[in-house]
Image (tube, helix red, strand yellow):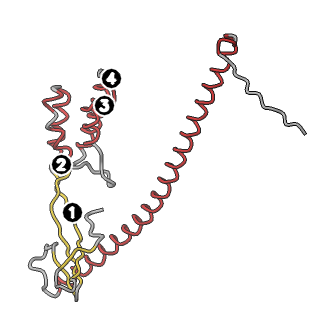
Amino acid sequence: MAQLESTEITVRWEDLSIEKIAEILEQKRKEQKELKMNKRAAYEGIRADLVFKIENAVRRVSDDVHSLFTFVCEETEAFRAIMGEYGQLRRENQMSYQLEEGNFRIEVKTNKVKKFDERADLAATRLIEFLTQWISQSDKGQSDPMYQLAMTLLERNKYGDLDYKSISKLYELEEDFNNEEYSAIMVLFRESNVVEGTATNFYFWERNNMGVWTKVEPSFNRM
């Protein structure tokens, strides 16, 4: 049986009508757009899966650490009362001490931290309003580095408290903003910085075979 010879058909652009060329180019654009969309969807799917898995793992560990922190706080505070009864505290209000048994040591350290009173909340609200007005007049909008820095320094911790060191850095921006309202807000922040709190830190240590004390994690601060 004779074999049919394949014939290669070559289409030249000059042989095509303008309408046909436009149709081919449009089809190519659609194919490229679909390819990009598929790649993006795949990327976003991988990203979402990664974040989901890590988030679940972090939340499990975070819950365990919070439970441990609560347990350590309650147990050490109860034992501190016993230490007071047995005369093991140098003074009644002593908050820092060490507990050691065998090759394990618990170190409890407290320190004073500067905090803000309710006037800081008003100052923070006024500052956000000021910054919103500021970026409305800036060509860079929210990408303005001054805006981004100030907003970052206004972030609160999980207890809703403002960070003293961060707010102190806002004072350094007063000259850069060179604005009466900003300066007035900084005055309010300074006036609200009149309250002192106490932060309790826990550290755990173990003694190795060489007799050297090494830290055991998690050693955590106030959570």
Of the 4 image quadrants, the one containing the C terminus is bottom left
Q: In the rendered view of the protein, which quadrant contains the N terminus?
A: top right
Q: Residue 165: which disc?
A: 2
Bin the neighbour count of mark 3 within 10 Å (Cα to Cα): few under 14, some 14-19, many 20 and up. Answer: few
Q: Secondary structure at mark 3?
A: helix
How packed mark 2 is, by other alpha carbons closer than 10 Å (few <14, some 14-19, many 20 or more), is few
State the residue position of label 1: 199
Q: How many marks?
A: 4
Say what amino acid the circle numbered 4 marks: Ser
Residue at screen point 23% across, 43% down: 120
The residue positioned 29% from the left and 38% from the top of the image is 151
Residue toward you, 141 or 6: 6
Q: Give the residue type at disc 1.
A: Ala
Mark found first going from the N terminus, 2 or 3: 3
Q: Position of residue 191 (x, y in %)?
A: 14, 42
**Secondary structure under the numbered disc 4 in the rendered image:** helix
